[in-house]
Each structure stands twice: as structure tokens, then as C-alpha cells.
Image (cartoon, rainbow, N blue to C red):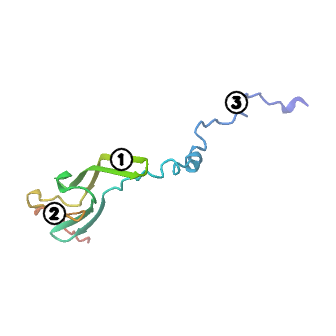
């Protein structure tokens, strides 16, 4: 009868405690929409990039920003666009008066496959669209290597 004795292990039946178990579900179910219904999130700078053999063309949508508040930096193959937001709105209806101000900065950086000849970059801004012509630097063109 005593040949089936087992040693007592006090930790064998302890369940693992995970303090953040289920937090993803809590955040998914937690909605701020009613509290923030009048608050509009500013969209990120939307970008389209096209490439030819000699240059890249970038079109960035930055609506409602003056061209003086846009900064473009090019370093090697990295392009950075920064736009400073300054917006004020005032709503008057009856006895209700509401004034809102938005100040901030949007940034967007991306890396291109080739270095850019920063001396030949051309930038223009019209109707909320920034257009960049980014010529590739010559001399660092990729070379196709045949495999034998």
C-alpha cells in the first residue's frame, strides 16, 4: 500500500499569474468615441512616391498648411517632411461660444533606395499638395550581376 507514495510539491498546482492577462480585450472594448466626438484627429501626411531611372517624384498631401510652414530635408536617401499646424476656429450659436485652436507638428520620414542629389531637388506646393522632384545621384547606380 505504501509503494505508491509521492513527494509533496507545494508549487505543482499553482497557476501562473499574469497581471496583464486580457488587457487587449479591455482596450478594444473601451471606447472614447462619445467623449471625443467633436475632436478631429489630424491625419498624417499622405505620400505617393514614383520612380524613374533618373529620379523620384513625391506627392505629399498637406492640406490647410501654408508653404512657409513646410520644411523638407534630404540627407542621402532619407527624405523628411515637417509641417507646422496652426488652425483656429470659432463657432457662435445663440448664447454658446466655442473657440478651438490646433497647434502642432506633423512629420513624415522615409528612405529611398538611392541617394538623392540634393543640389538638384525641386519642390513646389499648390492646393495642399507638396510635389518633390528628387534626382538620383549618379555614380552609385546599381549594377546587375549575372549568375553563372
First of labels 1, 3 by sequence position: 3
Is 26 placed left or right of 55 in the picture?
Answer: right
Is 145 placed left or right of 7 in the picture?
Answer: left
- Quadrant location of residue 65? bottom left
Foreground residue among 132 and 128: 128
Q: CA distance from mark 1 to mark 3?
A: 59 Å
First of labels 1, 2 by sequence position: 1
Residue 11 is labelled as 3
Q: Residue furthest front?
A: 94
Rendered view: 110 above or below 97:
below
Q: Secondary structure at mark 3?
A: loop
Is 11 placed left or right of 2 in the picture?
Answer: left
- Quadrant location of residue 118? bottom left
First of labels 2, 3 by sequence position: 3
Report whether residue 73 is seen: no
Where does residue 116 sit, x and y in percent of width and height? Answer: 15, 59
**Residue under pointer 1:** 100
**Residue under pointer 2:** 124
Q: What residue is rendered at 58% in x and 39% in y?
A: 20
Q: What residue is rendered at 73% in x and 27% in y?
A: 10
- Quadrant (top left, top right, bottom left, bottom right) of the N terminus: top right
Amino acid at each position: 500500500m505504501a509503494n505508491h507514495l509521492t513527494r509533496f510539491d507545494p508549487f505543482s498546482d499553482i497557476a501562473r499569474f499574469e497581471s496583464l492577462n486580457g488587457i487587449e480585450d479591455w482596450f478594444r472594448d473601451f471606447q472614447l468615441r462619445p467623449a471625443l466626438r467633436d475632436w478631429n484627429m489630424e491625419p498624417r501626411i499622405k505620400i505617393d512616391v514614383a520612380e524613374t531611372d533618373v529620379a523620384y517624384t513625391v506627392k505629399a498631401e498637406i492640406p490647410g498648411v501654408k508653404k512657409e510652414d513646410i520644411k523638407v530635408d534630404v540627407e542621402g536617401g532619407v527624405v523628411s517632411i515637417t509641417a507646422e499646424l496652426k488652425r483656429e476656429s470659432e463657432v457662435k450659436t445663440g448664447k454658446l461660444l466655442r473657440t478651438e485652436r490646433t497647434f502642432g507638428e506633423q512629420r513624415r520620414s522615409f528612405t529611398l533606395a538611392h541617394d538623392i542629389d540634393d543640389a538638384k531637388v525641386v519642390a513646389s506646393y499648390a492646393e495642399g499638395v507638396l510635389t518633390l522632384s528628387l534626382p538620383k545621384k549618379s555614380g552609385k547606380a546599381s549594377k546587375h550581376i549575372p549568375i553563372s
